Amino acid sequence: MKIFSGNSNRSLAGAMAKYLELPVGEAMVRRFADQEIFVEIQENVRGADVFIVQSTAYPANDHLMELLIMTDALRRASARRITAVIPYFGYARQDRKAGGRTPISAKLVANLITHSGADRVMTLDLHAGQIQGFFDIPTDNLFAIPLFARDIKEHHDLANLTVVSPDVGGVVRARALAKRLDATLAIVDKRRERPGESEVMNIIGDVAGRNCILIDDIIDSGGTLCNAAAALVDAGANSASAYITHGVLSGGAAARIAASSLQELVITDSIEPTKAVRQTENIRIVTTANLLGEAIARTASEESVSSLFD
């Protein structure tokens, strides 16, 4: 078994390799003067079970191309099996036709990864579970819920806790967390006026006097989450915190979180945090290295991965 990493999240790849007691494989990923990507695998991988760790976060297109070229290089070097470990799967929000003459980019990216030579894909909290069906190769969609549940038990009073979904589409995820914590459930009903903006309309459930935990898979601009937190506080909640798997946090999102009603935002390291994110006092990062590392170990030894979440 060998682990290689692109440039998107080398710190996470290193932590995963440390958990597995393996070195990160020697590979050179660099750019020519015109930004064309060049990859050279600098060790023997013939007959090896290879895992490439690469999130397709900003700059998404560069990191996606790195993944595709690394996969092709390993295939041509006669690796026995290549697993693309993509903690954050970019383009996942484009999983359907949102209007006339628009693409389904998530399917296109799945095709690119498959045809580049990947034999298997491992990812974390896909934006839409059905994206697994876009791949014609085995796909493992891992969940951060057990990781979040453990952290909430360590940092929050469970006796006065309500888990909140920031929109109707996230109810399944919120219910799964609430069940693990034996907590009540609430839903924020919102109306989106235009892309990237949302207006909170109503809160379904009782949050007065409760400590609320918002749960979601992606935070990008942070507008929806900040509006939801403000609505919860206005409805009488004692506090509002959030647990989000993928901290995209583009533009001025970190400053928006710092100035919001959120007591704390907890994200994973599926995307390497920027300096602004690391310096924001009410943002905390929990690692997925052990979870992903254990999933890799079980895949390599042909053991059950789904039992990790039982």
Image: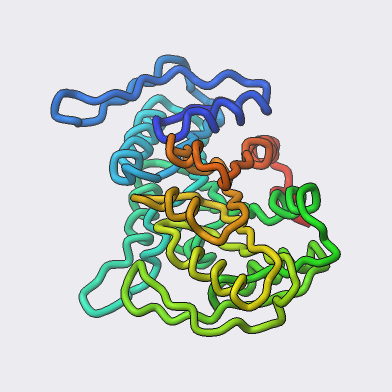
View extreme (top): residue: 43
Where residue 179 sits: x, y (%)? 78, 68
Q: Is residue 219 left or right of residue 17?
A: left
Quadrant, the N terminus: top right
Rendered image quadrant of residue 65: top left
Where residue 297 sits: x, y (%)? 68, 35
53 and 262: which one is in front?
262
| 53 is higher (above) or lower (below) than 154 | above
Rendered image quadrant of residue 288: top right
163 and 6: which one is in front?
163
Q: Look at the image and tell me whether residue 120 can be seen.
A: no
Q: Is residue 274 left or right of residue 33?
A: right
Where residue 94 sits: x, y (%)? 36, 65
302 and 256: which one is in front?
256
- Please tell me which residue is depicted at 37% across the width and 61% down the height of the picture: 107
Where residue 163 sits: x, y (%)? 70, 68
- Please tell me which residue is depicted at 67% across the width and 42% down the height of the picture: 291
Q: Is residue 240 left or right of residue 79?
A: right
| 290 is higher (above) or lower (below) than 91 | above
- Please tell me which residue is depicted at 39% across the width and 45% down the height of the picture: 57
